[in-house]
Amino acid sequence: MSVKKVLAIVLAGGEGKRLMPLTADRAKPAVPFAGFRLVDFALSNLANSGYFKIVVLTQYKSHSLDRHISETWRMSTQLGNYVASVPAQQRRGKSWFLGSANAIYQSMNLIGDAEPDIVVVVGADHVYRMDFEQMVQSHINSGARATVAAVRQPLDMANQFGVIEVDGDPVAGAVGAHKIAAFVEKPDSTPGLADAPDQFLASMGNYVFDTDALVEALELDAVNNDTKNDMGGDIIPYFVNRGEAFVYDFSTNDIPDATDRDRNYWRDVGTLDSYYDAHMDLISPVPIFNLYNRAWPIFTRNTTSPPAKFVRGEQNSVGAALDSIVAPGVVVSGGVVENSVLSNDVYIGAGARVQASVLLDKVTIGPGAVVRRAIIDKNVKVPAGATIGVDPDLDRARGFTITESGLTVLSKGQVVSPPDEREIELARAAAAELPEALATAVERDQLAQETVDKIVENQVKVVNSVTGG
């Protein structure tokens, strides 16, 4: 274990334009994710690593983020521990944060108050598990002044990341450490790794610095007219040019009870499609990212919601969830949920179908309604017999967001108008479709098929009942 004093700084001021409309009313790190907030992953990793002096730098629409941190992340003040949400304070001039480096520069008083030997700087909008103490030890043993965490990615994705090119062999005595030869932002191409020619090292946006070196670099950056005030774009290249920057290979990070399938999982959820894909990573029988690792838990605010409930609805329709994650407070009353993630207090009415979707807190799906490949933000009420994600042209006409992959996205509290007869017919047709998981289960079992046929018949009766068919 490191005996050095460590201060952790979480950069949580991002606007998250590519996640609109989910970020229309909140900062990107405050966006809900599978019952958590995105910031919970960064904070949980730091806490599990043994770092309990943490400041969170906020800026854009930060109210829900500040509230979540104040209600959730309470440390023992008697032991000098804290998670402090700190907004832009204009301590270094009359401007807001101009970039990630400027955010730390303007908050230099926090470093002065804590007097750390090491500063750990992490982003707040990625989904992953990481032991930062292992990275800090690698930093100390390598003799680096700055260390960048990097995740291995396929070579054809180099133009999507900040790329780290390494110099020579690994550093002896420092696990995962290589000296950085070049740090290039989104190049057209880059050399493959010596031990994996089809991969490269992509920056994770997580850094470790010797405190005095970081302070000096930030001071120089602040008076530089040719800067974007960015940690990855300006501060790290400064250390690379001085020969003082090293990379920490995330693949060497060892998390207790990690499985072969989810070890070294890291997902940048910066777009609606990647946000959706990360949710889908959770719901397979052997998940790509395992939320149930009790040895390295992800912490969030305790809920007062009651347990989830699955009950029969009108016409004896079955309430069921197949291959899905269901949070506390969810009620599935005669509807069918497939391959989906349901957050707290979602309600699914009789005869409704929810397929391959992400529903955030307190979404209500009315009887006989159909939701398919959609992300629905908090407090949306889908009327009986309505459809979301079934007809893209209809969704666009109602002002819903449609991504390049065809996802339909509704913003927080967005109003969904009652369906017309054409839309009701779409819902009726969807109700007659057999759920994929049940189709697989009954493929060779005639008795089970007859049972399922009866279930589907009841679902159709419900839809006809609530839509006047």
Image (tube, rainbow, N blue to C red):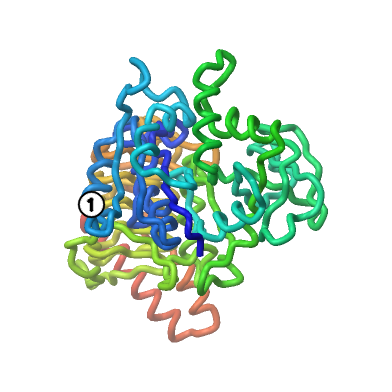
Give the side of residue 332 with respect to residue 443, left or right: left
Depth check, front residue: 469 or 210: 210
Q: Is residue 233 left or right of residue 53?
A: right
Q: Is residue 156 left or right of residue 308?
A: right
> Is residue 197 depicted above or below 23 in this figure?
below
Q: Residue at x 51, y 28 (%)?
A: 218
Q: Position of residue 213 (x, y in %)?
A: 55, 36
Which residue lies at the image location 54% right of the left edge and 33% below the top edge? 231
Give the total number of marks visible in the rendering. Answer: 1
> Observer-nearest residue: 69 or 414?
69
On the image, the x and y values in percent for residue 156 come to: 74, 43
Q: Quadrant of residue 315?
A: bottom left
Residue 217, placed above or below residue 312: above
Place residue 225 in its image quadrant.
Answer: top right
Report if residue 464 is visible in the image. no
Q: Which residue is mark 1?
A: 362
Q: What crowding class fits label 1: few (fewer than 14 Cα within 10 Å), some (14-19), or many (20 or more)? A: many
Q: Is residue 93 above or below residue 25?
A: above
* Closer to the camera in the image, 320 or 205: 205
Residue at figure coordinates x 61%, y 56% from the top left: 138
Q: Residue 30: image x %, image y %?
A: 34, 43
The three-letter code of the residue at mark 1 reads: Lys
Question: On the image, which quarter does residue 391 sit in?
Answer: top left
Local secondary structure at mark 1: loop
Quarter of the image that includes the C terminus = bottom left
Q: Could one spot residue 232 in this view of the protein?
A: yes
